Image (cartoon, helix red, strand yellow):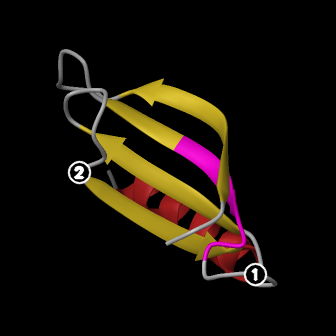
Amino acid sequence: MGGKLEIRKEIPLHGTKNGKITIGELQEPYGEGSDSVVSVAVSLNGKDADWKIHIPYPNLEDVISALQEMRKDG
């Protein structure tokens, strides 16, 4: 994975002492000329990403809708 990460938001991770969710934009993640993606990382210790996903911008609305539906069910 390459590219420059611009962090947009850090959120404390519920149920941990130091964990956080980091949301940002990763530019050219798959090499020069590749489209930017939204990057979401979860860190249990607040430093090292334990899980990471990349969401292409054209998929973002569908992901947001799915998360909002899950919030209603939870």
Q: Is residue 26 magenta?
A: yes
Nearest to the eye among marks 2 and 1: give it. 1
Horizontally, is 10 left or right of 18 in the view? right
The residue where tag 2 is placed is 50
- Tell me what residue is drawn at x 59 percent, y 72 percent: 55
Residue 46, above or below 29: above
Q: Secondary structure at mark 1?
A: loop
Magenta stretch, main secondary structure, is strand
Q: Is residue 27 magenta?
A: yes
Establish if 61 lies above or below 6.
Answer: below
Q: Are marks 2 and 1 in contact (CB under 8 Å)?
A: no
Give the amino acid type for the residue marked by disc 2 in the picture: Asp
User: Does 70 sit left or right of 3 as displayed?
Assistant: left
* 63 shown above or below 70: below
Q: Amino acid at mark 1?
A: Glu
Residue 36: horizontal and vertical position, in percent?
75, 70
List the residue tagged with mark 1. 32
Residue 51 vs residue 32: left or right? left
Provide residue 51's location: percent of width, then percent of height.
29, 57
Q: CA distance from mark 2 to mark 1?
A: 26 Å
Start-end of magenta stretch: 23-29
Q: Residue at x 81, y 84 (%)?
A: 33
State the count of labels. Answer: 2
Provide residue 12's location: percent of width, then percent of height: 39, 23
